[in-house]
Amino acid sequence: MRITRYRTLTTVQDWGRPVGDANGVYADGLVRVPIVVVETDEGITGVGLGPHVEIETVFAAIEGEDPRSVTALYDRMLRRTFKAGHAGAVFGTIGALDTALWDIKAQAAGEPLWRLLGGRDRRVPAYASGLDIALNDEELIAAYQTYASHGLRAAKIKGGLDIDRDRHRLTLIRDLLIDAGLGARPSLMLDVNEAWTRKQAVRHVGELEQTLDLTWIEEPVRRWDVAGHKTVGRGVRASVATGENLTGLEQHRPLIAAGAVDIVQTAAVWGITHFLRVATLAHAHDLPVSPIGTTPVGLLHAATSIPNHLVSELQDLQPPVGVSVDLHVEDGAYVLGDSPGLGVGIDEDAIAAASHLVPHPTSGGSHIRPERAGHRLHPAGVDGEVESTVLNA
């Protein structure tokens, strides 16, 4: 079997409501979803959700190769791009191709990927993550009631702009989960998406912990700030979770070696091989791992095969337009199916019909860091306006 060519598609995740975080909001709830399809000479195709950046250069490393040599081909892609740098979006392109190759490998074996990788239990524990910073109280409650109806006992909200608002919203979600009969002490997480300085993080989380039991604080400071994460970890009771925006073992290693991270995260867009390697590094330091992503199907399969998976993020309960996935959510967990490979189907007609919904790459959203991020004296609203006179520095 040989890799012959690739195709790229772009569809949209239609949330039907505003979504975003401390960095920005997609007001119409429409988010671009790039897709890579890899074809072989035996008619098996693999699907990876991720960027197309520099894909011609990256694909040259695997064209004509046997797609079943996945990990070796992953390293070939890294070597092909090492000079200009394989971080950021280029690393996402490598991850998308890597995911597609794992899909092909498992299809060729006639098994779901979770089985091929050595998984025993198809159930993957999940937590609710609504990308909810723009929602009012009623909308927030409605969103998390839907998650609770699927048995999700843990929830992560977006915050970091106003600590009083964060406390109020976390309390609403805690009470909702308790009232839904999902436990007397549901797990609560706060994700501030790199919006704070070290001192802000310690002060604000410490204030929250006077009345709330936080499971973790996510990305409290800039992703590469080893000393900052360590300072936060020493100053709060909650675990420190980070890593979704780190690309490569070389970026994870300093945080793990310094004891600056408690929950090691990786994003689905970076691919399966990356996740497996980071999970092994974390396991060597007795640390759990937690996958991140809107449609993290590849990492869900991989999570079944590692000893240190903790819980996986569940964002939208619906897949992107034109994408089907052989899994469902029940009793607080993803339940993977038996379809060979990843179980991902692509309806290109549906994607083409929805092309007018795909936002322009330069449109606003949470992918653009605000000018004053981490340097605000007062609490800021979702739109950046000051909502309170309480000092926030």
Image (cartoon, rainbow, N blue to C red):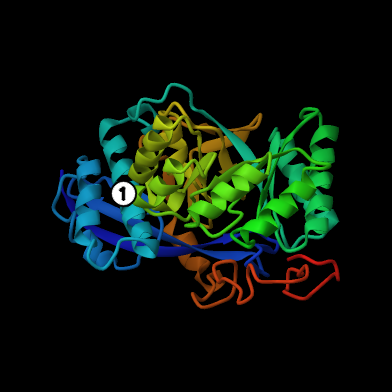
Name the image quarter holding residue 282. top left
Relative height, residue 190 to residue 150 (above, below): below
Badge count: 1
* Neighbour tally class for label 1: few under 14, some 14-19, many 20 plus, Cα within 10 Å: many
Name the image quarter holding residue 329. top right
- The amino acid type, in three-letter code, at marker 1 is Asp
Quarter of the N terminus within the rendering: top left
- Residue 284 or residue 112, whichever sits in front: 284
Q: Is residue 131 visible?
A: no
- Residue 9 or residue 219, whichever sits in front: 219
Q: Is residue 61 visible?
A: yes
Horizontal placement of 118 versus 10: left or right? Answer: left
What secondary structure is marked by label 1? helix
Q: Residue at x 70, y 59 (%)?
A: 160
Relative height, residue 340 to residue 388 (above, below): above
Find disc 1 in the rendering and name its residue.
98
Q: Residue at x 69, y 37 (%)?
A: 154
Percent across and percent down for residue 237 are 68, 39
